[in-house]
Structure formats: structure tokens, C-alpha cells
Amino acid sequence: MCIIRILKPNSNVALVWNSRDSSSQLVIENAEICRNLCPLFKGFSGGIENTPEIFDQFFRHGKYEYRTFRNDIEYNLDSFIGRNLSDSHAPKSTDSKYKEFVKALTELFMKYSTDEKIVLPSITQSYIGKV
């Protein structure tokens, strides 16, 4: 693991990122759009959210501290579509499903937006431990 060569001995590593709250109906419908129109979609965050064995293998002796924090994110229509298009699984503008993807996201935004804003329920996840 190349990270070990740049760490001070016996140091901790922190992995931190935002994930969509998979219990939210908005997120469930967003994932359904991706499943239907994005052949590379394996789940948000590359599908690793529900795979603790990855973290058990990454951290020394499978020991780490895990914490979550609520971190809802507000978007307007352009930023919501842009956020979805920035995902690695999203169709490119030259792909046959691109226009259908943008249309479906626009409809989803309209369904859940208030005052031209949408709140994407999100959770910041953090893993801290030695490697």
C-alpha cells in the first residue's frame, strides 16, 4: 500500500466523504434513474457504502473508528444535474442515454424542489484508523 511510505510511523489515516442518504425517497428515485440509464452504475460512491470488509482489510487489524454526520446539500436545477453528470457512471454528452438522463433528472428535481431548490439528503462518513 503506497500510502504507508508517506505516513509518519504509527499514524492514523482518515477517510472522509459525503454519501447520499439511501433512506431518502429522493435518493432512491435518483438511484433508480441511474440504474436504468447508466450502464456503469454500481451504486453511489462506486457501491462501496455497504461493504465494510473493504475497510476491515484497509485498516490494520480491521480496527477503525467510524462516524457519520448529517450534511444535507442544497442544489438548484443546474447544480443538481451537474452533480449527477459529474459521477463517473453518468452518460457522456455523446452517449445515446444522455438526453434521457438529463430529462429524468430534471423531472426528479421538479418533483422534489421548493422555491427552485432541492435538498439532497447526505451523510458525511469518516473512517479513522491505522494502516
Image: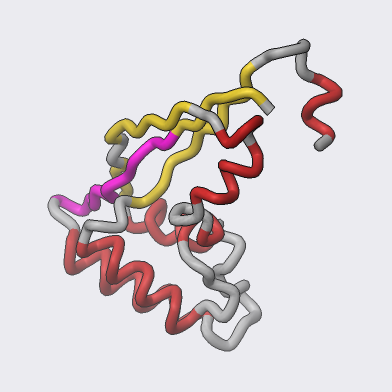
Of 18 and 77, which appears nearest the observer? 18
Q: Quadrant of residue 93?
A: bottom right
Between 26 and 77, which is closer to the camera in this rendering? 26
Seen in the picture, residue 3 relative to 37 is either above or below; the reply is above
Tell whether position 116 is magenta. yes
The furthest residue to the left: 114
Q: Where is residue 75 in the image (x, y as percent from the top left)?
A: 32, 48
Q: Farthest residue in the bottom direction?
A: 96
Q: Is residue 130 visible?
A: yes
**Stretch of the chain drawn in magenta:** 115-125
Instruction: Estimate the x, y position of residue 73 in percent, counting from the top left.
Output: 32, 41
> Looking at the image, which residue is at 18% across and 62% down?
112
Q: Indicate left or right for 59 with 19 as reference.
A: right
Q: Where is residue 2 in the image (x, y as percent from the top left)?
A: 84, 34
Q: How is this picture coloured?
A: secondary structure
Residue 50 image offset from top left, x and y in percent: 44, 56
- Residue at image x 43%, y 83%? 36
Q: Is residue 82 visible?
A: no
Which part of the image, by quadrant, shows the N terminus? top right
Quarter holding the C terminus? top right
Residue in the foreground of this view, choosing between 43 and 52: 52
Nearer the observer, 95 or 58 = 58
Residue shown at 41% from the left, 47% from the top:
19
Question: In the image, is residue 8 part of the stretch drawn in magenta?
Answer: no
Q: Can you say whether 75 is above or below 66 in the image?
A: below
Q: In this view, does 86 lie to the left or right of 44?
A: right
- Numbered label tally: 0
